[in-house]
Amino acid sequence: MADPSAPVRGQSPSAIDLTAAEGCRHGFPHELFTTLRREAPVFWQAFPEGVAGSEDEGFWVLSKHADVQAANRDTELFSAMDGPSLASNPQMRGRMLVSMDGRDHIRQRQLISAGFTPRMVGQLEEQARRWAVSIIDRALERGTCNFVQDVAYPLPMHMIADVIGIPVEDRPWLFDLTTDFLAAGDPERGLSRAQQLALQARMFEYAQKLGQHKRESPQDDIWTILSTVEVETADGERSQLSQIELDLFFLLLTIAGSETTRNAIALGLLALLEHPDQLETLRREPDAMRPAVEEILRWSSPVSYFARRATRDTKIRGVPIAKGQRITLWYPSANRDEEVFREPFRFDIARTPNPHLAFGGGGAHFCLGANLARREIAILFEELLARTRKIEVLRPPTYSALGIWNPILVVPKEIPVRLA
Ligand code: HEM
């Protein structure tokens, strides 16, 4: 295997094009970011001429841990209003948790925080274990399966569905729709923008029906809270969340809660299988799971970047950033930063300390589902290791390169495995 810590042979930073999806066909382009960290830690990436998707001319790429963390925490200097994606999306501006600043953001975040406290996550734990057992047993009955779709995907989907309050009978249909929607950005699938929007419209339609149902018969779940709550607007009025706000919340929760955790589990399995000694340690020593989950998160870093916009002229490492320019915070790169992690390209389940930024840099938008995701990953591997003697990858994994407009950028598509 090529050494990812070596700079890309013959590639100077100026030749780098992060907007080309091909660079991600085999996973996150770590080699390229190693070059950037070393040679151009604050790097301007211009959009190719004629690109449709953004009105900006390009964006700044922050690849160092310290810079990603500092920019993430300074929400006054770097606004989240235009959302995490580099794609222009005026419809979402100020209307979705991830595309809000200041008091509006705090207010909306408080609304759903109740669903994610450590106490709530503790209560979900038993449910998570039941789902994990049934998912793994089904895969064991079949013997061979696509680990991504058949094991890593259903647990986070069921957990987020439990948190939102989606009836079990709706889930097969909704999970299929979500799978289609998540894969829609993969250029290989060739879906037109209109087809992608049609999938989104079906998800919104379902969210609306669910809201209606919760208003008629309220339950102890997040969708009841969001569909009935009254919030105070900036001018002191009280009103319910608008339909578009609710629609976008639904989209955010289903995507944020599923795809990310799925990728961590899938890439975590690959890392463990490549390090059988560490896998055996995990089988023998239950206490090893907690730091192992942190290493899986650092290693997999399922979110590639989140974007922000500079609210005034500033400088990072002496490089001038103009007011209005977009910056991007690259979490997988921060998590391989040689200045923070000793031997960053070594997977080590006992790594301590492990100040990874997989859930963000500790700023106002820090991942709300971090506790839930950590527990899901731990439970899935606990049950998988308890129920299997042997896990074998049958063919090399394949990846979907989702393109620069999707902050997740690249996801494992197929990991064919045999479970015994
Ligand atoms: C391994 C799994 C996960 C990873 C790597 C991950 C990563 C992230 C990252 C990087 C952010 C942006 C943080 C920032 O801008 O500072 C974020 C935000 C968020 N995540 Fe997660 N996430 C995961 C799982 C989840 C789950 C399971 C849920 C919900 C059930 C969730 C819900 C959210 C929400 C609602 C936000 C937006 C918070 C805000 O803007 O205030 N995430 N996540």
Image: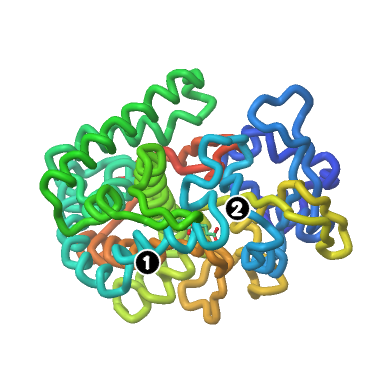
Q: Position of residue 31 (x, y in %)?
A: 70, 51
Measuring 61% from the left and 45% from the top, which residue is drawn there?
A: 82
Which of 292 and 368 lies nearest the eye of the viewer? 368
Give the image location of residue 250, x and y in percent.
35, 44
Please, is residue 59 above or below residue 275 in the view? above
Position of residue 303 measured from the top left corner of the image (x, y, whole percent): 52, 52
Q: Which residue is mark 2?
A: 80
Alpha carbons under labels 1 and 2: distance apart: 25 Å
Disc 1 target residue: 374
Q: Is 328 placed left or right of 165 in the picture?
A: right
Percent position of residue 21, x then y: 62, 34
Q: In terms of secondary structure, where does tag 2 sit?
A: loop
Observer able to see residue 419: no
Q: Is 226 drawn above or below residue 189 in the view shown?
A: below
Q: Amino acid at mark 2?
A: Ala
Q: Residue at x 53, y 81 (%)?
A: 352
- 43 shown above or below 373: above
- Quarter, ligand 1: bottom left
- Mark 1 C-beta closer than 8 Å to ligand 1: yes
Secondary structure category for the residue under label 1: helix
Task: Judge the density around disc 2: few (<14), some (14-19), many (≥20) Cα neighbours within 10 Å.
Answer: many
| Residue at the (21%, 44%) spot, across then down | 143
Asked if the beta carbon under badge 2 is closer than 8 A to the nearest atom of ligand 1, the reply is yes
- The picture quadrant where one finds residue 248 is top left
- Amino acid type at circle 1 is Arg
Q: Residues within 10 Å of mark 1 (few under 14, many from 20)?
A: some
Residue at screen point 34% across, 59% down: 112
Left or right, 64 with respect to 127, comes to: right
